[in-house]
Image (cartoon, grey):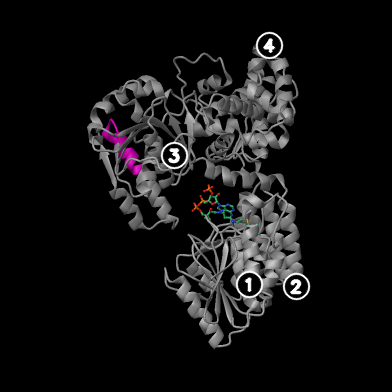
Amino acid sequence: MAAVNAVTDLTREGDIAVLTINSPPVNALSADVRNGLRGGVEQAAADAAVKAIVVICAGRTFIAGADISEFGRPSKGATLPELQAALEGGPKPIIAAIHGTALGGGFEMALMCHYRVAVPSAKFGFPEIKLGLIPGAGGTQRLPRLSGVENALEAVLSGNPFDAKQALAWGVVDALVDEGKLREGALAFARKVIDTHMPLRKIRDLNDKIDAARGHPEIFDKVRRDYARKYRGFEAWQSAMSAVKAAVDLPFDDGMKLERQAFLDLIPTAQSRAQRYVFFAERKVWKIADIADDTETLPIKKVGIIGAGTMGGGISMNFLNAGIPVTIVETAQEALDRGLKIIRRNYDNTAKKGRMTQADVETRMALLGPGLKLEALADCDLIIEAVFENMDIKKDVFQKLDKIAKPGAILATNTSYLNIDEIASVTARPDYVLGMHFFSPANVMRLLEVVRGEKTAKPVIATVMHLARKIGKIGVLVGVCHGFVGNRMLHQRQREAQKLILEGAMPWEVDRVIYDFGLPMGPFAMSDLAGLDIGWSKETSKSSTIREILCEMDRRGQKTGAGFYDYDENRNVKPSPVVEKMILEFAAKKGINRRRITDDEILERCIYPMINEGAKILEEGKAQRASDIDIVWINGYGWPVYRGGPMFYADLIGTDKVLARMKEFEGTMGADFKPAPLLEKVVAEKRTLHDL
Ligand code: T1G
């Protein structure tokens, strides 16, 4: 055994050299790994006794891509083109032995080898697009030569992995070996290569599938149409398209050059920096400063849900999908039946789309038990309340629940803004009470705000964070304040949006600016979708706001075919002359001199107060770190990932600019724009907000 460097060992099995990469956690293609690979291959190539070389990784996975943390830093070590020369250009057959996930640069490195073997559980893919990048080491040139152009476009543009069976079908791998016997299987394959004198097979020389696509631009036109909507606002996908097209139109080396340049051009872009930031931010949320990773977690074998409405039903599905039995309780049979029916319908629709089998549907429904009494939840390990958003009702439920639930059961509320400590105070187990704020539709939205009460015990937090991961959510720990992180910041935007349509803008102008900024919809379209009458009642309505007047006019949103917008029978939306007239009259009655408002002002007044509120949330310790706030907005409110989140965006445009504009607005519009001390401090100390 000879160490090539700290992360690479070279051993010999007869006339076969085995190069083992060992760089936890995911053998990322760091400078050390690249140096070890090149050094090891060159050593083995120079060793006359060696007839073939196997490259294999220790640990849980084959190389899972370039080391993302190295991007944007001066590059050290062997370059990818140098690695290619040592591998593909080497004199002896090289076999890549693959397990876990061969992703990005790791997959490209394997494609530089002459042969590949894998275990059946291995996965392959080019997730670069999710980092605002494209493959930069030949992935867009080599994969289409094996999989065909359409499949390569799908792999590079979706960024989604494909399995070993698919890889074998495409000729990406030459053989599958027994699970758990990768090394033996690879050595046996190398043996065959030597004994049967198999050639140094270079993918660059395989042109059949490329030739077949030449003269068929329609392949690209269709894909361009399909992805234009999905990647609205994103940049990298166009470069990915051009690179794969170059594989068809250009000789291999010219295609490589084009890909490389496109890749290098994307690294410094704001979008890629944002998406790389989000990659690490999504992994940081699980780290809780005062709760050790090995904190004891409580077993959650059965879950109780109170309320079978939209939220209760969606929440239940998360646990059913994870194989955890659920008892769902309602006060009336009719409401219970309605809730169960919606859950089954959702599953049936998913099965119809082929995303699960009917057997899967039945398995999940079999785990679901209905109840009409809270007592039905006595044996649950976790009970989540999703009843009407009213403090008295919630306190009443928790008081009763506390007496029924078994000792050690966790009691959670799905409130989206009420005070968790007040709810916990009516129980004898405030240390077992917390908030689990799901986002609608709860079975789809990835975000879960885990709200830590004053007395919530650490094992309870650790248990719920662990459970969040188990049900496929991103759990973000937040503190008790009105609206927690997401809704508290959203309130800032909604307030300004309401003011802007009085001062001179129209709802559809504000929405256009927010939509063009990259959010899925603007505040007024969102209100129409949610329903304008949430928290409204005819009895107390006094025509004091535009929203009240709309409700009084029975314009309650999409559900009534009219709200801020008019909707036709197919829910196509259009600006409403009725609403325009009503807003102008309302403003005049209020004595407001309307003025022309620019798109920039609309954007700044909607976004900057959110950033400012984010700074206050950090000051108050209601979020652990700024990147958690960004993860809340990206996964809960559709903030475009290519803008990194409100806090990252603030640094992108300059916190000094945000502060200056806030002060200007404060000067003319008052305390709503009073800068947070933390924002002042960050600007004064020339620091950045997103890494606080
Ligand atoms: N670089 C640096 N660190 C990485 C990393 C990477 N590529 N992948 C994972 N990590 C860290 C991660 O931050 C975490 O650290 C730990 O490893 C475990 O990760 C030239 C341009 C492999 C499927 O995009 O998708 O190649 O938080 O928690 O859930 O064309 O990690 O523990 O300190 O995610 O089991 C392309 C990214 C790069 C793959 C494992 N590759 N990684 O998932 O563990 S661009 C990727 C993943 C590229 C070339 C280009 C996943 C995983 P910590 P984890 P996991």
Residue designated by label 4 = 591
Residue 251: numbered disc: 2
User: Which callout, 4 or 3, points to the residue nearer the camera?
Assistant: 3
Q: Main secondary structure of the magenta part?
A: helix
CA–CA distance between discs 1 and 2?
Answer: 27 Å
Q: Earlier in the sequence, mark 1 or mark 2?
A: 1
Residue at 63% in and 18% down: 672
Q: Is residue 175 positioned above or below 591 on the image?
A: below
CA–CA distance between discs 3 and 2?
Answer: 54 Å
At mark 3, the secondary structure is loop
Is 305 positioned to the left or the right of 589 in the image?
A: left
Q: Earlier in the sequence, mark 3 or mark 1?
A: 1
User: Which callout, 4 or 2, points to the residue nearer the camera?
Assistant: 2
User: For the residue with label 2, is its CB less than 8 Å from the closest atom of ligand 1?
Assistant: no
Residue designated by label 3 = 292
At mark 2, the secondary structure is loop
User: For the residue with label 1, is its CB less than 8 Å from the closest atom of ligand 1?
Assistant: no
Residue designated by label 1 = 41
Three-letter code, disc 3: Ala
Three-letter code, disc 2: Pro
Quarter occupied by the C terminus: top right
User: Which callout, 1 or 2, points to the residue nearer the camera?
Assistant: 1
* Magenta part of the chain: 329-342
CA–CA distance between discs 4 and 2?
Answer: 70 Å
Q: Earlier in the sequence, mark 4 or mark 1?
A: 1
Residue at 28% in and 28% down: 401
